[in-house]
């Protein structure tokens, strides 16, 4: 029975040339499979004895290390499959968006055309979210670059004159879990679309997307410098976008508030409680 190592840690421990609390080695046995063992050496000093005494604990961790390696391989395979799935979903959404746009051009009814164009914008935005998350694989998402790329995609697909309307992203550095990033991306998409549809009847203005961390909590806000809220906001009819934002915020344990931006409107989504998923990661 021998150790597959360039030097003998037990001898080093006895001679005081090295001190290791625990270490692993391969236990090679002639004619039998090698085993992975965990060694825990301890020098015993009784004071009155002239002889050095060494206490060694040996634990066979072969099966445990095998299962750990197998789990790592399965997780890596899962990450690859997830990335491929996200890529295919993004492509499928873009195809659906193209079909909606073609249908919008063919219909005669202005109301039907408006609904199809609205659906096209939402599908394109969802495709943009999926594309960015696919690029990030299954790891935590860096929120600043994520929001910048998302708003860049929204502006490219929905703003015709970037000299008159622009989107500015102001975000702290930090990371969000993939699950939370999806919901945050969809909330930003709905709020930005709402600004582009209603805030600038003259076709000119600016949208600011802000994300701030407060320890393990966060706050997202989307504001514009447009025409502002209606005189009686409570009487305004809640659309599909508003309902989606409320539902997504509730899933994240967040509250939605709407304030006057003087000028314009600011919609804030503030995390007030811990959701079921771990949300914030340290930078």
Image (cartoon, rainbow, N blue to C red):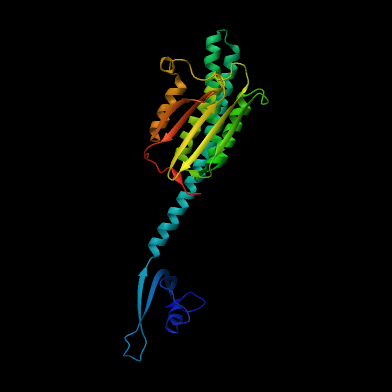
Please identify the quarter of the rendering in which residue 132 is found: top right
* Side (left or right) of 161 relative to 223: right
As drawn, the residue found furthest toward the top would be 108
Q: Is residue 177 visible?
A: no
Please identify the quarter of the rendering in which residue 263 is found: top right
Q: Measured along the vertical axis of the image, is residue 115 above or below residue 153?
A: above
As drawn, the residue found furthest toward the bottom would be 50
Q: Residue at x 47, y 42 (%)?
A: 213
Q: Nearer the viewer, residue 39 or 209?
A: 209
Q: Measured along the vertical axis of the image, is residue 45 above or below residue 194?
A: below
Q: Nearer the viewer, residue 176 or 39?
A: 176
Q: Nearer the viewer, residue 81 or 24?
A: 24
Q: How many marks?
A: 0
Q: Measured along the vertical axis of the image, is residue 30 above or below residue 239?
A: below
Q: Position of residue 138 (x, y in %)?
A: 49, 44
Q: Nearer the viewer, residue 68 or 260?
A: 260
Q: Residue at x 52, y 15 (%)?
A: 115
Q: Residue at x 41, y 31 (%)?
A: 249
Q: Position of residue 204 (x, y in %)?
A: 63, 21
Q: Position of residue 65 (x, y in %)?
A: 41, 61
Q: Position of residue 247 (x, y in %)?
A: 40, 28
Quarter in which the N terminus is drawn: bottom left
Q: Is residue 18 visible?
A: yes
């Amino acid at each position: 029975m021998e150790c597959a190592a360039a030097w003998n840690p037990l001898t080093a421990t006895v001679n005081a040339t090295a001190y290791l609390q625990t270490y692993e080695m391969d236990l090679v046995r002639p004619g039998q499979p090698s085993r992975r063992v965990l060694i825990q050496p301890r020098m015993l000093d009784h004071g009155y004895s002239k002889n050095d005494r060494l206490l060694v604990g040996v634990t066979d961790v072969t099966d445990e290390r095998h299962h750990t390696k197998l789990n790592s391989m399965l997780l890596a395979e899962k990450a690859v499959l997830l990335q491929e799935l996200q890529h295919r979903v993004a492509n499928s959404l873009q195809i659906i968006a193209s079909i909606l746009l073609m249908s919008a051009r063919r219909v005669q009814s202005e109301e039907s055309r408006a609904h199809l164009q609205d659906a096209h914008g939402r599908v394109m935005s969802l495709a943009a979210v999926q594309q960015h998350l696919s690029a990030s694989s299954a790891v935590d998402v860096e929120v600043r670059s994520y929001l910048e790329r998302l708003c860049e995609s929204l502006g490219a697909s929905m703003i015709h004159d970037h000299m008159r309307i622009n989107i500015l992203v102001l975000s702290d550095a930090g990371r969000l879990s993939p699950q939370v990033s999806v919901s945050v991306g969809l909330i930003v998409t709905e709020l930005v679309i709402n600004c582009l549809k209603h805030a600038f009847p003259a076709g000119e203005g600016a949208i600011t997307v802000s994300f701030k961390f407060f320890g393990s909590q966060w706050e997202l806000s989307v504001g514009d410098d447009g025409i502002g809220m209606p005189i009686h906001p409570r009487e305004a009819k809640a659309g599909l976008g508003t309902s989606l934002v409320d539902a997504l915020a509730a899933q994240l344990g967040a509250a939605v508030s709407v304030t006057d931006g003087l000028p314009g409107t600011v919609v804030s989504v503030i995390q007030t409680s811990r959701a079921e998923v771990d949300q914030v990661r340290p930078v």
